Image: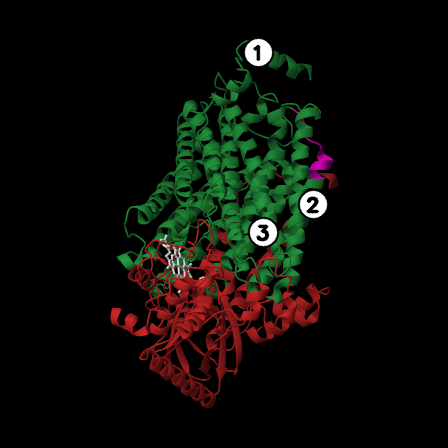
Chain colours: A red, B green
Amino acid sequence: MSVRNMKTFMGALSSVLLLAAAPAWAEYALNLTEGVTPLSRNIYDLHMTIFYICCVIAVIVFGVMFWSIFHHRKSRGAQPAKFHHNTTVEIIWTAVPILILVVMAIPATKSLILIESTGDSDLTIKVTGHQWRWQYEYIEEGIEFFSSLDANSNEARQLKSGIDPSQIDNYLLEVDNPVVVPVGQKIRFMTTASDVIHSWWVPDLGWKRDSIPGFINESWAIIEEEGTYRGQCAELCGRDHAFMPIVLKAVSEDEYYDWVGEMMMVAMEAEAGADREWTMDELMAQGEQVYGTFCVACHQVNGMGIPGAFKPLVGSPIATGPVEDHIDVVMNGVAGTAMAPFGMQLNDVDIASVITYERNAWGNDMGDMVQPSTIAAMR
Amino acid sequence: MSDVAAHEHHHDDHDHKPTGLGRWLFSTNHKDIGTMYLVFSLIMFFVGGAMAMVIRAELFQPGLQFVDPQFFNAMTTMHALIMIFGVIMPAGVGLANWMIPIMIGAPDMALPRMNNMSFWILPFAFAMLLATFFMEGGAPNGGWTMYPPLVTQLGEGFPYLIFTVHFLGVSSIMGAINIIATVFNMRAPGMGFMQLPLFVWTWIITAFLLIASMPVLAGAVTMLLTDKYFGTSFFVAAGGGDPVMFQHIFWFFGHPEVYILILPAFGIVSQIIPTFARKPLFGYESMVYATAAIAFLSFFVWAHHMFTVGMPLAGELFFMYATMSIAVPTGVKIFNWLATMWRGSMTFETPMLFALAFVILFSIGGFSGLMLGITPADFQYHDTYFVVAHFHYVLVTGALFALMAATYFWLPKWTGHMYDETLGQAHFWLSTISVNVLFFPQHFLGLAGMPRRIPDYAVQFTEWNMISSLGGFAFGLSQLLFVWVIIKCVREGKKADEQVWEGARGLEWTLPSPPPFHSFTVPPKVDASVAHS
Ligand code: HEC
Ligand SMILES: [Cu+2]
């Protein structure tokens, strides 16, 4: 039976096994996705092959076992035999599994070689995991942005929020800024992390790869169908591990280049902002936004942090002390704690504004402000 | 009956059984220490089980209903640490303590005082671990695997976690040394290595695994400690260290550890199936060699727990082939159990039922394990509920079911009373049905894309999570019945004779039930009628 035929068979089998289950989600919820890349299809076929081999072995072994349980029971008057050894049989049941394993290992080796062929890519995207969002950098185009859980899901996922998750579109699988990629091109993903280990996983691409501080891992995908593909961080990365999804939009090449143009415009505007003087109101408004995206998960909306885990900023010796120390903590982080260095992640405007915000929000009222040019000078 | 009583009486004059609390605190008696290990692990089973109930309650539906994500992470972390180090391992050591001396005809363990210490470390270690719930930053919440850098973000509980691991390691190593010393030096005359009951064999091999792997874990967690407090950078990338190195070291311990949990279970099942099939164990020698082969190979497959960290192709291939090869000796064991049943004369008392469920359900865990070992497929399965389903099949319906089988099998020997067979079978059926409702759907969840260690999930995972949670609650409740069966057996079970089971073979069945406080003070004569076959 070819793998494709097997798939049809599997479909039939699962419907039979799950008569009670609603057909609409039966297939989706039961098995691995076939995905939309050559790799994902390859892995799916491998998965089905080993699954069927296991099923056949299981049917034989458990069949023999149940036959014996049924026939060789004392209540049916069975007399115990005396044998306890048989070299021929023992050689057979050692050799046959070895052969079966070799049969499995051959396609597995082939797919592994394919998976590791990351060369000749058309496009490179660097993916950086942060607690708790993803950052994407398009190396050739020079585009860079963060992607966080979208506001609706974020509101609904708070403890006892009272919001019904089924009323939220793509609950926990929606972000503010999706990654946009062209179909039909070989995309190389380089994964790394800034703080703890994360793992970037979109099931439709067929693989996940850990993103590890100090390491860059390479993987690739050629997406064959336009569409939106969703995934999640797969490696436990702290409190909000469940809340850093991935949304990947595969679009036509034209649409992709339109999007690249737009993103470049946004970047140019941001750069222009870094050179001018900012007013207190502008800094506070921008700072609140940055704080809400990057800091709130630990230091909380009210700046009180979480005792024992994340320090409060209200009345903190840093946020109400010399501004140089404050800038230092935010840009360079605090080694050995969850406070990451934000100097690399955030631009001058964002750092200047979030520091200004922390020094003047929640009754900290320091009255001073930090200009983007000050941050630029300190880099 | 009167025969047994007379026998007991005869032992009384040299049975100086200490009384009061001192009997337990200062015990050097293998039976008392074995009992303490077993009771301790039963208590911890409910502590770890309560945490599992919190997990399943929170996962019953999407959204966060009960606990903060960080507390949820503490639940998964502590559940794992307690179930592994506080339940399965102590129960295994408890069985070894009780059974090995009376299986090999020894008067006690070789190092009785060390035996006392290796037990009494445990309650203190776990008190320390549980105390972290009340510390700033809460209990450990970075996963039982303690991966840096995440684990070093833990608050005040961090050093307590590290020292708990150290204590547990010390306790296990002392237990292992004791078992090796006992089996090597104190076998009754005429009992060679190839006459040892298989339970004893699996424990010797387990003991060597413990001695080889526990110090590795101790080293790894000590490096975590110095990274956090003393400025070293073993695993800190910014300081030139390597976070992946921790995973290599951890799993070099961790993979042998899973065999530490399961090999004694293999031994138990190898005692029970021949007893209730009334037929000698098929392929005794190949069972011993297969166990040794599994133990040996377990040191060469660690990286299959971390295929996704990014390894060179050659490394991935090596660890894939090595992992697949473990299926061969494991298969041999399953086939040997089948051949033991074949043309036997089987009855299905509770121990046999649990042993048979073990063979089937452990095999299912073995199949998913084989699938996980295939590297390309693991890139999809890794860190999903498919993995959660896999290791609960091998550890709950595998190791834990074997421990329950052992309890029912030897309870009459330990207490001198039969348990209530009807209740025992009720416990079996309730457990077996609910545990599959609990864990089987998790295969589907994982394949459909649900990551593990998350407190909240996308709505398409709702149905299977609800079913799984219901199974979980039912499984949890069923275990109360287990406790009741044990209490009832101790208090009012009808008297058991020394043989207990019609098909039982071996020295332990030549002693009265319960055996006297000191047994085999004069070594027994071992001949073919009591040896394993
Ligand atoms: C992952 C959690 C986390 C995030 C996100 C985070 N912090 Fe922190 N932050 C911490 C921790 C933990 C400390 C305490 C470090 C220590 O022990 O000194 C800290 C300390 C600080 C301090 C010093 C407080 C003091 O009194 O010592 C400042 C200022 C600060 N953070 C600002 C920020 C800013 C600005 C952001 C967002 C751009 C941010 N933090 C995001 C965890 C976090
Ligand atoms: Cu993450």
The residue sitting at 44% across, 72% down in the picture is A285
Examine the structure image and report whether residue B423 is included in the region drawn in magenta.
yes
Residue B430 has which mark? 2
> What is the chain letter for disc 2?
B
* Residue type highlighted by circle 3: Ile
CB of mark 2 within 8 Å of CB of mark 1?
no
Q: CA distance from mark 2 to mark 1?
A: 41 Å
Dot placed on the residue nearer the N-terminal end, 1 or 3: 1
The answer to whether B112 is drawn above or below residue B298 in the figure is above
Residue A55 drawn at (x, y percent): 59, 61
Task: Identify the residue under disc 3.
Answer: B55
Q: Secondary structure at mark 1?
A: helix
Q: Nearer the viewer, residue B452 or B258?
A: B452
Q: Earlier in the sequence, mark 3 or mark 2?
A: 3
Q: Are marks 3 and 2 in contact (CB under 8 Å)?
A: no
Where's the C terminus of chain B, which quadrant?
top right
How many marks the image carries: the answer is 3
Res. B492 visible in picture: yes
State the residue position of label 1.
B12
Q: Amino acid at mark 2?
A: Leu
Direction top: furthest residue: B13
